[in-house]
Amino acid sequence: MEREKGSDAQRVSKGLFQAWGVREVVTAVLMNVLILVLMFAGSSVTMLHPHLAMLASGGAAVFLGAAVFMLMVFRVNRFGVTTLFATMAALMFCTMGNYAIMIPFYIAGGLVLDLVFLRSEEQRRSIRWVTAAWSTFSGLYLLSTMIPVISNLDAYIDNFIRNFGSDQAFIDAFLRYYTDPLWVFGIAIATVICGFAGCLAARVLMRKHFSKAGAL
């Protein structure tokens, strides 16, 4: 029993402290950019209607980003891959008008996901663990919207109008859904489900295309 515990500890330690090489860094950065582009594209499609945007923008984003996230984790297989992604995501969101206060939330969230779901090589090779990591990130991604709302709602709305030129219909829809805890909770759960569904779709893609192409 002691040998087994020692062996488990060694595997976790190896997974945590395995060094990143230039190849892993470049692969992670490029694939993170692709994830963010896909998330932005998914979110943009929902902007055709205010209520659709408030209810489904997060879900559409995480659904489209799931496949590339899973592929990235498998290809890079280094501890900290989710932390790097979350950091890049936070920085991009800030350039689009969100508050810098979101950066620590994303970095801490990414690190927790790495420690809980992806701390060892075995976990980073497991579809189930990677699915759990992305599904949890999906919920945190939606809930991060509440940070500027809670800190300073009026300033957030002014900033939103200034950066995106939103009309009153979008503002009214935002206030309807994101100032009501029940709606926020419901949208967060729906976003988690979309992230999970994206991972299920990613499994099919990986079996049919990525594996045959030698991408895994």
Image (tube, rainbow, N blue to C red):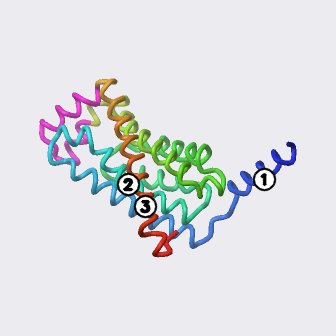
Identify the amino acid type marked 2. Answer: Met
Circle on res. 10: 1
Q: Is residue 154 above or below residue 141?
A: above
Q: Which of marks 3 and 2 is in front?
A: 3
Q: Name the residue under label 2.
A: 92
Circle on res. 203: none
Magenta: main secondary structure: helix
Q: In this view, does 75 lie above or below 84?
A: below
Choose between 148 and 62: the one closer to the eye: 62
- Left or right: where 168 falls relative to 189: left
Q: Mark 3 points at which residue?
A: 68
Per the image, label 3 sits on a secondary structure element best described as helix
Residue 9 percent coordinates (x, y)? 77, 48
**What's the residue at 50%, 75% (across, down)?**
214
Task: State the residue lying farthest toward the bottom.
Answer: 213
Whichever of callouts 3 and 1 sits on the residue coming sooner in the sequence is 1
| The N terminus lies in quadrant | top right
**What's the residue at 87%, 43% (across, down)?**
2
Whichever of callouts 3 and 2 sits on the residue coming sooner in the sequence is 3
Q: Distance between the residues labelled 3 and 2?
A: 18 Å
Q: Is the C-beta separation of discs 3 and 1 under 8 Å?
A: no
* Magenta segment boundaries in residue numbering: 157-179
Choose between 198 and 95: the one closer to the eye: 198
Per the image, label 2 sits on a secondary structure element best described as helix
Q: Circle 2: is it few (<14), some (14-19), or many (20+) Cα within 10 Å?
A: some
Choose between 100 and 122: the one closer to the eye: 122
Q: Nearer the viewer, mark 1 or mark 2?
A: 1
**What's the residue at 47%, 48% (across, down)?**
134
Per the image, label 1 sits on a secondary structure element best described as helix
